[in-house]
């Protein structure tokens, strides 16, 4: 029989990762996790977010995508500037797909413009986000 590294009547010297809770908060704030949680809040929540969509009857047709979902993820990230956040999520196809962007990440300038448009709807986002998400912000 193989000899155990620690005898049965001895306490282990260390338990690697046993008290590592900081990883959980980072995972909770991951963009894909947040999109899934927001979508799971139901139709009432998504209906309020739809009110934040800015209609444009002029200019070029916009690609499909749900900008309010992406904007909430940016706000929850606590990143003060859009560009560093954008550089972190630009290659995350699952995130952009979950937000309804079928062609991958939009250009940085487009993201900046859409987020600037959404700032006027801050009151809707405050209604939508439950205390669980607000505590992360």
Image (cartoon, grey):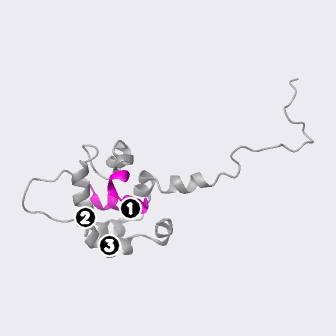
Q: Tell me if residue 80 is in the magenta stretch.
A: yes
Q: Do the residues labelled 3 and 1 touch (CB within 8 Å)?
A: no
* Comes first in the chain, label 3 or label 2: 2
Using the image, determine if residue 38 lies above or below residue 92. below
* Comes first in the chain, label 2 or label 1: 1
Left or right: 53, with 32 as reference point: left
Q: Tell me if residue 101 is in the magenta stretch.
A: no
User: SS of the residue at dot 1?
Assistant: loop
Front residue (pair 88, 123)? 88
For the N terminus, the image quarter is top right
Mark number, residue 80 = 1
Q: Dominant secondary structure of the magenta stretch?
A: helix
Task: Give the image location of residue 119, x and y in percent.
Answer: 28, 69
Q: Are marks 2 and 1 in contact (CB under 8 Å)?
A: no
Q: Which residue is tagged 2?
A: 116
User: SS of the residue at dot 3?
Assistant: helix
Q: Which residue is drawn at 78% across and 44% down?
A: 14
Q: Which residue is tagged 3?
A: 122
Task: Give the image location of residue 83, x and y in percent.
Answer: 32, 52
The magenta span reads 65-85
């Amino acid at each position: 029989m193989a000899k155990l590294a620690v005898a049965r009547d001895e306490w282990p010297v260390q338990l690697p990762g046993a008290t590592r809770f900081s990883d959980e908060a980072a995972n909770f704030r991951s963009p894909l996790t947040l999109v899934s949680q927001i979508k799971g809040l139901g139709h009432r929540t998504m209906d309020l977010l739809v009110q934040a969509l800015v209609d444009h009857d002029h200019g070029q047709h916009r690609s499909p995508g749900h900008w309010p979902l992406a904007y909430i993820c940016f706000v929850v990230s606590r990143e003060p500037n859009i560009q560093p956040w954008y550089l972190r999520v630009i290659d995350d196809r699952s995130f952009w797909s979950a937000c309804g962007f079928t062609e991958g990440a939009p250009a940085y300038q487009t993201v900046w413009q859409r987020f600037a448009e959404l700032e006027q709807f801050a009151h809707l986002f405050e209604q939508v986000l439950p205390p669980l998400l607000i505590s992360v912000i």
